[in-house]
Image: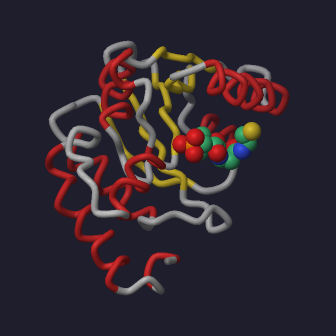
Amino acid sequence: MRTMIYPGTFDPLTNGHVDIARRAAALCDHLVIAVLNNSSKKTVFPASERADMVRCVLQDADNITVVAFSGLLVDLYQQMQASAVVRGLRSAADFQFEAQMAAANQIMLPDFETCLLPCRADLAFLSSSIVREVASYGGDFTGMVPAELVPRIRECFSKTRNNPSENGG
Ligand code: PNS
């Protein structure tokens, strides 16, 4: 039984994440999507809602489980008896960060394996921060996230626009 972990903040989930998740799920028996719940990292959506959005979009995939996690990824890795962590790669800039994380995780846990999956070329521009930026100005982000998430993301940002003190302004 090969378990892979796809960790991230997913604030919010984008079409790029969905592409990586589905391709990673095809490479293993069980894919655990691990949604970071770290109080020191400020997010627009709380971890429970980010995890819920991932579940809602990927509920048709029968070898995907979604969990929220806090603390170190190496601890989750051991707990899940994982074979590898998968991360999407969009650019050379991503590679720098991913190589650093992979090295740090491997120093903490020598068996820790990281697989970097190149993203689809047409999604290379996409990030959660771009979605947040566009949504925060009321722009059209419909091609960037799964259709079923559009209303809840729009609603969250329209509340923020009407009441800037919500969700960190
Ligand atoms: O989607 P992101 O924000 O790029 O994901 C980053 C994530 C969640 C994979 C990374 O921050 C992480 O693994 N955090 C858990 C804490 C940890 O283990 N840090 C040490 C890795 S260097």
> Is 94 situated left or right of 34 in this image?
right
**Can you see residue 76?**
no
Which residue is located at x 46 percent, y 25 percent? 3
> Is 37 situated left or right of 100 in this image?
left
Query: In the displayed image of the protein, which residue is found farthest to the right?
Result: 107
Front in this rendered view, residue 160 or 33:
160
Q: Is residue 130 above or below residue 109?
A: below
Residue 103 in the image, given as x and y percentages of width and height: 79, 24
Q: In this view, does 100 lie above or below 42?
A: above
Residue 70 in the image, given as x and y percentages of width and height: 60, 56
Location of residue 17 by image quarter: top left
Which residue is located at x 54 percent, y 59 percent? 37
Q: In which quarter of the image is the N terminus?
A: top left
Which residue is located at x 43 percent, y 49 percent? 67
Front in this rendered view, residue 8 or 151:
151
Front in this rendered view, residue 18 or 154:
154
Front in this rendered view, residue 152 or 115:
152
Residue 166 in the image, given as x and y percentages of width and height: 43, 82
